[in-house]
Image (cartoon, helix red, strand yellow):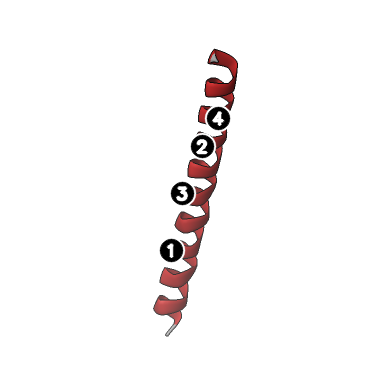
Amino acid sequence: MVKKIILFKNYVLVDVQVWLFYKYKILYLFILVFLLR
């Protein structure tokens, strides 16, 4: 039970990090495209 909770927490942390990474990557690409137009 405790192991499952720890695993769940780790998955959530990884998920948030990945989401933030992609969010900022997309934002960065939009800015690049905007500047290069």
Real-space Cα separation, disc 4 to disc 2, in angstroms: 6 Å
Q: Which residue is mark 4?
A: 30
Q: Secondary structure at mark 2?
A: helix
Mark 3 Cα within 10 Å, few/some/many (few <14, many 20+)? few
The quadrant of the rendering that contains the C terminus is top right
Spot occupied by residue 1 in the image (x, y as percentages of width and height): 42, 85
Q: Residue at x 48, y 43 (%)?
A: 22
**In whole angstroms, how far apart are the C-alphas of marks 2 and 3?**
12 Å
Residue 18, image x, y percentages:
46, 49
Please name the amino acid that badge 4 sits on.
Answer: Phe
Residue visible at 54% across and 46% down? 20
Which residue is identified by label 1?
A: 11
Q: Nearer the viewer, mark 1 or mark 2?
A: 2
In terms of depth relative to the viewer, which is nearer, 11 or 31?
31
Nearer the N terminus, badge 1 or badge 4? 1
Mark 3 element type:
helix
* Mark-to-mark CA distance, 1 and 4: 28 Å
Residue type highlighted by circle 3: Val
Q: Do the residues bearing badges 2 and 3 touch, measured as CB atoms within 8 Å?
A: no
Please name whichever residue, 14 or 24, is drawn nearer the observer in this view of the structure. 24
Q: CA distance from mark 1 to mark 3?
A: 10 Å
Q: Position of residue 35 (x, y in %)?
A: 59, 16
Q: Nearer the viewer, mark 1 or mark 3?
A: 3
Alpha carbon separation for disc pair 1 and 2: 22 Å
Quarter of the figure with residue 34: top right
Sequence-wise, which precedes: disc 1 or disc 3? 1
Vertical placement of 1 versus 7: above or below?
A: below
Residue 6 percent coordinates (x, y): 46, 71
Distance of mark 3 from mark 4, alpha carbons? 18 Å
Q: Amino acid at mark 1?
A: Tyr
Task: For mark 1, give the secondary structure.
Answer: helix
Query: Which labelled disc corresponds to residue 18?
Result: 3
